[in-house]
Image (cartoon, rainbow, N blue to C red):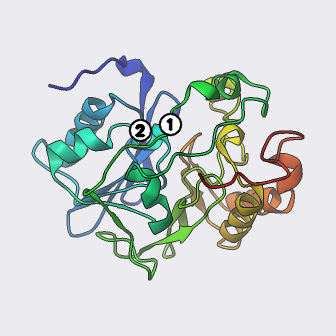
Amino acid sequence: MDKIPLPFYEVTPLDHIAPGVKGLRILFVNLFAISTPSGGWTLIDTGLFLSAGKIKHWAEQHFGKDTKPQAIILTHGHFDHVGAVKDLVEQWKVPVYAHQKELPYLTGHEKYPPPDPSVGGGLMAVMSPLYPRTSADLAGKVQALPSDNSVPTLPGWRYIHTPGHAPGHISLYRDEDKVLLPGDAFCTTKQESFLAVAKQSPELHGPPAYYTPDWDAARRSVQELAQLCPRTIAPGHGLPMSGDEVGDQLQRLAINFDHIAIPDHGKYVHKAAATE
């Protein structure tokens, strides 16, 4: 039986994001379920360690007690997005997909660069040296996403390689209604600040600064996503946003990325981290 240390008041459903898209926030990170007209569903990211029980309970409420996802898609391998993946894979026996460039981190071959606690000026940044640099070891259980940018089990969706926050970071996009799941390519909260994370007032920010080792790539990724002019965004951190103004706000973030997102100082601000 799963150990469930988190109280339920720290678990917030994010329902009705878009047709077929539901979300769940556990503490400070979001994960998503995307369903298809055929009746199947796919889990996007798996939140924090020891949250598998919460995720299964939430999934059962929406999809039925004995219904498991067709697959798990990982936007990247940072600890707060893969925390429950090993437990869930063991229980569900479903395939896991990630970008080819993220596989070395998801199979125990590489560590992420050290986080930078000097950026952001908030508690989340100060605490970042305590965050794991290793990902979940999914050797033999994770496979690369197709090279044609299609997303297995999700017709109508495509993935976009959006590095900067992580080498193999991806975002998911549905062209039909312009729904974007950007992962951590950008946030709708100032993730470096514990107060901002707690308040969850939706506003566009760059990726979590303390864990972004390549700012040039991060800028290019946001610029590419802005060109999509999404109408709905549901990021890994912060509240979903929807409406005609979303595309304009993302354009402003892309144009003013250096001023809004990049810290004034930090170990990776002027030079990207070398791959270990």
Quarter location, residue 2: top left
Looking at the image, residue 126 lies above or below residue 34: above
Residue 47 numbered mark, or none:
2
Quarter location, residue 146: bottom left
The N terminus lies in which quarter of the figure? top left
Label 1 residue SS: strand
Q: Position of residue 84 (x, y in %)?
A: 33, 38
Label 2 residue SS: loop
Q: Looking at the picture, which amino acid does disc 2 mark?
A: Gly
Q: Is residue 73 left or right of residue 89?
A: right
Which residue is at the front of the view, 255 or 164? Answer: 164
Tag 1 and tag 2, C-beta contact below 8 Å: yes
Residue at left offset 81%, top offset 53%? 271
Looking at the image, residue 33 lies above or below residue 158: above
Residue at left offset 78%, top offset 33%? 120
Residue 274 is at least partly visible in this image = yes
Residue 29 numbered mark, or none:
1
Residue at left offset 61%, top offset 24%? 198
Q: Looking at the picture, which amino acid does disc 1 mark?
A: Val
